[in-house]
């Protein structure tokens, strides 16, 4: 009986000693599919600050640091789904990105403690097309899919699909000119010409992917032909072939100042 107890204790001691002599990495658990075995510093470098999470709490390996210290490695994966980036809402807006899968997925905070979310770039539509939901397209009067194909190009914040719609080739109505916003501003034009639904008329494409278009702007009405009492002469514009000329004038008999004057295009 004593021999059996002694043998059992000896066997346990041998097993414990063998385990102690085994490399630590032999006991490490492999990472599941989609996860990578990394140190915390490497995870931050690979995925970005706040854009990763631990798959399991058990270590998966170890790595020697430049100072010689041994660092534990764990299984990490990106917080955002594949194809999405972890960005602030401001940065996503600048880049023209939309919420990943139409959902507001939190993925951490940046160095300034601003919240980060998962965003994805919409599939680009051809230059002559715009990425819109069916509701937006109907409101703008766009009734044709780009290249006659129902091409999905993203989702709006509600998760509704967006498609590439052909931008109608519209000519500006009389009294309007087709310009970019910058060109219109340089010419002092600020008012858009509107369609039947009250929307600004799009008359050209600069870069649909970035939302840059040409619109119909109202031209400035030329000053009508009239007498300028301060200048003492006729001013204003007339149609081609005619000039703004004095037609009638009355003066005060004593002061000889003009009391009434009328100019016509002749």
Image (cartoon, rainbow, N blue to C red):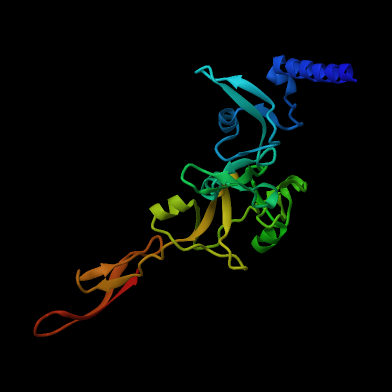
Residue closest to the eye, 65 or 19? 19
Q: Quick one: which residue is furthest to the right in this view?
A: 1
Any part of residue 106 in sight: yes
Residue closest to the eye, 252 or 10? 10
| Residue visible at 68% across and 36% down in the picture | 57
Residue closest to the eye, 64 or 223? 64
Q: Quick one: which residue is furthest to the front in this view?
A: 2
Which quarter of the figure is the N terminus placed in? Answer: top right
How many labels were placed on the picture?
Answer: 0
Percent across and percent down for residue 261 are 25, 78
Name the side, left or right, on which 261 lies relative to 30.
left
The answer to whether residue 149 is above or below residue 217 is above
Q: Quick one: which residue is furthest to the left in this view?
A: 254
Percent across and percent down for residue 47 are 60, 34
| Residue visible at 12% across and 80% down in the picture | 256
Name the side, left or right, on which 220 lies relative to 28.
left
Quarter-wise, where is residue 135 in the image?
bottom right
The answer to whether residue 244 is above or below residue 119 is below
Quarter-wise, where is residue 132 in the image?
bottom right
The answer to whether residue 232 is above or below residue 207 is below
| Residue visible at 70% across and 48% down in the picture | 101
Any part of residue 207 in sight: no
Name the side, left or right, on which 151 lies relative to 210.
right
Quarter-wise, where is residue 221 in the image?
bottom left
The answer to whether residue 221 is above or below residue 80 is below
Name the side, left or right, on which 148 lies relative to 91.
right
Percent across and percent down for residue 233 are 22, 69
Percent across and percent down for residue 193 are 53, 63
Which quarter of the figure is the C terminus placed in? Answer: bottom left
């Amino acid at each position: 009986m004593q021999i059996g107890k002694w043998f059992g204790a000896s066997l346990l001691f041998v097993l414990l000693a063998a385990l102690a002599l085994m490399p630590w990495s032999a006991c490490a658990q492999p990472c599941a599919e989609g996860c990578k075995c990394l140190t915390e510093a490497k995870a931050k470098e690979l995925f970005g600050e706040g854009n990763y999470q631990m798959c399991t709490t058990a270590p998966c390996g170890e790595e020697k640091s430049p100072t010689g210290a041994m660092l534990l490695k764990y299984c990490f994966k990106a917080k955002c789904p594949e194809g999405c980036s972890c960005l602030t809402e401001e940065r996503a807006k600048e880049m023209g990105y939309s919420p990943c899968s139409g959902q507001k997925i939190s993925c951490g905070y940046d160095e300034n403690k601003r919240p980060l979310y998962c965003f994805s770039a919409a599939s680009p539509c051809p230059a002559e097309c715009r990425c819109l939901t069916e509701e937006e397209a109907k409101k703008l009067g766009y009734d044709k899919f780009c290249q006659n194909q129902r091409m999905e190009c993203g989702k709006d914040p509600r998760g509704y699909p967006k498609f590439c719609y052909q931008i109608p080739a519209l000519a500006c109505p009389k009294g309007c000119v087709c310009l970019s916003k910058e060109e219109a501003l340089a010419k002092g034009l600020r008012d858009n010409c509107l369609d039947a639904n009250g929307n600004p008329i799009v008359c050209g494409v600069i870069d649909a992917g970035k939302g840059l278009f040409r619109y119909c702007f109202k031209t400035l009405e030329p000053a009508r032909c009239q007498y300028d009492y301060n200048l003492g002469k006729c001013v204003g514009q007339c149609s081609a072939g005619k000039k703004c000329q004095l037609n009638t004038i009355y003066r005060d008999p004593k002061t000889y100042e003009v009391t009434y004057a009328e100019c016509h295009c002749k």
